[in-house]
Amino acid sequence: MLYELILISPFMCILVLYFVAAIVSSRKERLKKWPLYRYGLWFLGVFSAVAALVGPVAKQAHVDFTAHMLGHLLLGMLAPLLLALAAPMTLVLRTLSVSSARRVSSILKSKFVRLISHPIFALFLNIGGLWFLYATDLYAAMQQSLILHWIVHLHVFLAGYLFTVSIIYIDPTPHQYPFIYRGIVFLLAFAGHGILSKYIYAHPPVGVTVADAEAGGMLMYYGGDIIDATLICILFYQWFRATRSHRFAN
């Protein structure tokens, strides 16, 4: 019980903080009310992450690779997408005072943020991390070490979120890259994820049975496709809107 509380406490904190910030900022006279659908997206994102860490899926994931893969999709792909669509940084900037918001903006413009938000860097962390997890003995090792288990889950979530916000721009993004550049990076990630799922299907990770690896690989392949299709649709929609606005401006 204590273990589960420690795991989900960060997500419970960001859930409460988000709702408080949204309500507080909505009461400011000069600002519009924070959209209700963003509350829903944030809640669903937190719920997806928590469902991967505690409860039946998380318990089964310790002995069932298919359940582990379901947790990967929830924690590393669906939760990051939903949370990114909830525009948390926009909410932070409109909630803070002007001086504090300027300090946050200066951090967003820093070289460090430029590096970690670069699509190629995020691609390496996200897809490269997954290859390292499943193509080496790391998966077997994380099942034997609680600390390593936490580190891997934290990496999967953060890398998934970082990659998502490097492809689609929902929040203010000082370091922006062209749509075609992000589209190419996304296709590389899409291919890397799909090839990895087939690799898992044919080469089960250490300690995973053939049947379990086949089921997990198929879930990773088709489940990842659904979430990736949503992500690419959003990217193309943003591309279409930007192109249309540019034409009207000219």
Image (tube, helix red, strand yellow):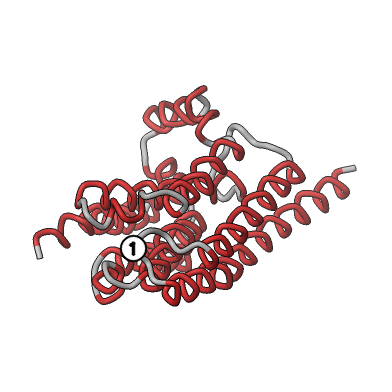
| Residue occupying the point 45% across, 44% down | 89
Residue 90 seen by the camera: no
Mark 1 element type? loop
Work out which residue is located at the far right of the displayed protein and give it.
250
| Residue occupying the point 37% across, 59% down | 206
Work out which residue is located at the far left of the displayed protein and give it.
2
User: Could you classify mark 1 by the number of other residues whose Cα lies within 10 Å: few (under 14), some (14-19), or many (20 or more)?
Assistant: some
Name the spot of residue 153 as percent of width and height, x first.
33, 53
Name the spot of residue 82 as percent of width and height, x first.
47, 62
Q: Is residue 187 above or below residue 128?
A: below
Camera-nearest residue between 232 and 83:
232
Residue 15 seen by the camera: yes
Q: Is residue 173 above or below residue 106?
A: below
Name the spot of residue 159 as percent of width and height, x first.
45, 46
The quarter in which the N terminus is drawn is bottom left
Q: Amino acid at mark 1?
A: Gly
The quarter in which the C terminus is drawn is top right
Horizontal arrangement in the rendering, residue 231 relative to residue 250 (left or right): left
Camera-nearest residue between 225 and 232:
225
| Residue occupying the point 54% across, 36% down | 117
- Looking at the rendered structure, the number of numbered marks drawn on it comes to 1
Residue that label 1 marks: 207
Name the spot of residue 150 as percent of width and height, x first.
26, 50
